[in-house]
Image (spheres, coloured by chain):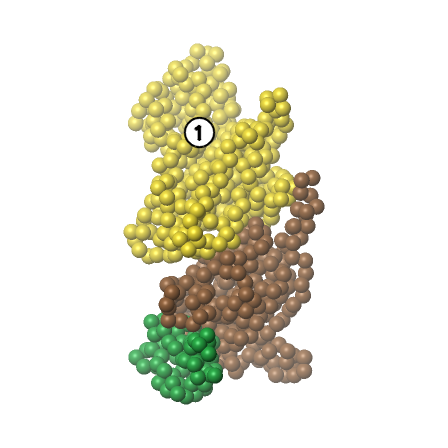
Amino acid sequence: MNSEKKYKLLQGNEACVEGALAAGMRFFAGYPITPSTEIAEISAQKLPQLGGKFIQMEDELASMAAIIGGSLAGLKSMTATSGPGFSLMQENFGYAAITEIPCVIVNVQRGGPSTGLPTSPAQGEIMQAKWGTHGDHPVVALTPNSVQETYEYAIEAFNIAEKYRTPVILLMDETVGHMREKLQFKDPSEIKVVNRKKPTCKPEEYIAYKPDEDMIPPMASFGEGYRYHVTGLTHDETGFPTNNNEISGKLVQRIVDKVEKNIDDITFYEEYKMEDAEIVIVAFGGVSRAAKSAVDNMRNNNIKVGMFRPITIWPFLEKQISAVSEKAKEIYVAEMNLGQYFIEVDRVAGKKCPVKKINKITGELITPKEISDAVMGGRE
Amino acid sequence: MATDKRLLQNKDWCKGCGVCVGFCPKQVLKIVNEKCVIANPEACIFCGQCELRCPDNAIYIGGNEDEQ
Amino acid sequence: MNTNCSNLTEKYFRVNRLPHIWCPGCGHGTLMNTVVRAIDKLGLNKDEVVLVSGIGCSSRAPGYLDFNTLHTTHGRALAFATGIKLANPKLHVIVIMGDGDSSAIGGNHLIHAARRNIDITTIVFNNNIYGMTGGQYSPTTPYGDFATTAPFGNIDKPFDLCSLAQGAGATYVGRATAYHAPMMQKLIENGLKNKGFSFIEGLSLCPTYYGRKNKKGNAVKMHTFFKDNCVDVKVLEKNPEKAENKILLGEFYNNPKPEYTESYQVIIDKFQNK
């Protein structure tokens, strides 16, 4: 089959749609915002050709609500936005989390806060992705660093959303969204597509929020004969609201646990020249490309440096970062913000070795030289 | 034919708001101890005003039509 | 089940969830029953009916009814409903909202759902107050009335929700009250039959907060106010003087136009697999 490989020169945002469609996306609701707009435009073009549905909503509050509705009616659903829109989506992100309705939210990060730098890259929503909506809740956020990875992790995002019945964030940045690279399409036979678990019992026996042993309740679509109730209030296994303290606590604990306790299943990362690395640069998304270059340059000067690149940003890869800290003498966290991922790395690795920041918030990508200067400057 | 109709209540659901009493044209109903009671059942003409207006589905006209 | 209730209640209610949480005399229970009677009259398949609500007193209605029911976030019911309807146009999608829910926090969603003319029947239980939070003024609280957040009288001007919906593009618009329950039922039936965005305002009564704050009397008195102060919009044709200082009820607008999901299907049919 390799002779038939299909290649295309595509933008990250285009690859995102290609991956989503390959995973089975058939519903998109969104609102235009730079630098994610191409994702909506291409979805508008391609979805009806596949019998799917696209709608441009009146704002991001509504976009997030509409994809939850679309998913509840049985279609795999996605929205795409950037910082200001991501802020508005937080309301119903929490709703999707507590009602366990699978969906994918793409956030192509730009400079903030507020309207900020609409056309420039940033990584300022690392913590917002985790804590943007109120209350304790599960979060899965994946961060690709290339066009190819955007395609592949868009598929993965849908699969995780469907498998764990939870909203999943594809946390891109402007650099990745707008860069053009070669994309190698996968043959449909090579693509693993996960679909949500459906009830097999009779409708009258269906207890909508009663989890199986894997902590995940089977999900019926509206209209399939399983009439049930969905609410953003804390609810018992029947789906109806409850004020019972114990049941409320158990619900929130379960929706967090179903993700956190399956972290190995959703752990993705890359290690680059880490075998003998004494200095480790932690970087992700667009910045990781500069970090890789910096590693190569420093290796040419016989500096034992490597890169650890989390692709799964949330849940935090505590086990892997902890392992890195066992061997490293120094860790640098390079990110286009004032040190958000740093907080987590320092929490886990800080007891073993010094953890330092390399930050930039000017709306420009951190350069390889800035990274190597920071590392070399720290080694006088 | 109308004789198998009966005015029935679910007292557990009644909140004693008095809307049924207020709109009963034949003074069949009254509120006693914050619940509606059918005080004068023989006067009922089964007009359905109480069932139509009761916000709590607590009063209704029953009777088994299949038994006719 | 051997529940002590009417056949209609037994057929359409989740009777184990009753009694509902609404206060004694609240008009919402009566309006909820008009929705049930309309669905029954049209003989809709319960499996194909979806009821969506937002937040507030009105939003509790779907939880008591045996359909596919979705209790969403404040103001967003129509946005969720839009997603459901577009994803599966075969479903009968009904949205129940309150006055604040539909026209304050959800005002933008209301006008855009109406503009698209998507086939959703929207029913507003308008009690002129935020009841769930204890009696604050809403966008339909009359000028000069009192609320916990308008202790010196309300200086906001109220929305006419039906005019708002019609102006935004709803293709079926009507208003009735909890007192005029048969008319309310009929309007909902017509709204469900309209292939497009239907908007039915049901004037409700809140004896606990709005009524008490504004000395409107008990539930019977508040019903009687509707009885005495509302006229059918049809009087405008022959006796417009009868409408003076009255609340107009009835069918205000019925003008079918191309429906959103049908228009989208035309696009799919034309471009699918091409």
The disc numbered 1 marks a residue on which chain? A
Q: Residue at x 41, y 52 (%)?
A: A206
* Residue A102, percent from left and from top: 47, 44
Q: Secondary structure at mark 1?
A: loop
Q: Residue at x 36, y 79 (%)?
A: B36
Q: How many labels, in total?
A: 1
* Residue C265, percent from left and from top: 65, 50
Q: Residue at x 53, y 44 (%)?
A: A77
Residue A276 seen in the figure: yes
- Looking at the picture, tell me which residue is in the foreground, C170 or C44: C44
Q: What amino acid is found at the position of numbered circle 1 in the picture?
A: Phe
State the brown chain: C
For chain B, the rendered hue is: green
* Residue hosting label 1: A268
* Residue C152, percent from left and from top: 44, 71
* Residue C23, percent from left and from top: 38, 70
- Looking at the picture, tell me which residue is in the foreground, A4 or A98: A4
Within the image, what quadrant is residue C206 found in?
bottom left
For chain A, the rendered hue is: yellow
Q: In this picture, is C258 found above or below A265?
A: below
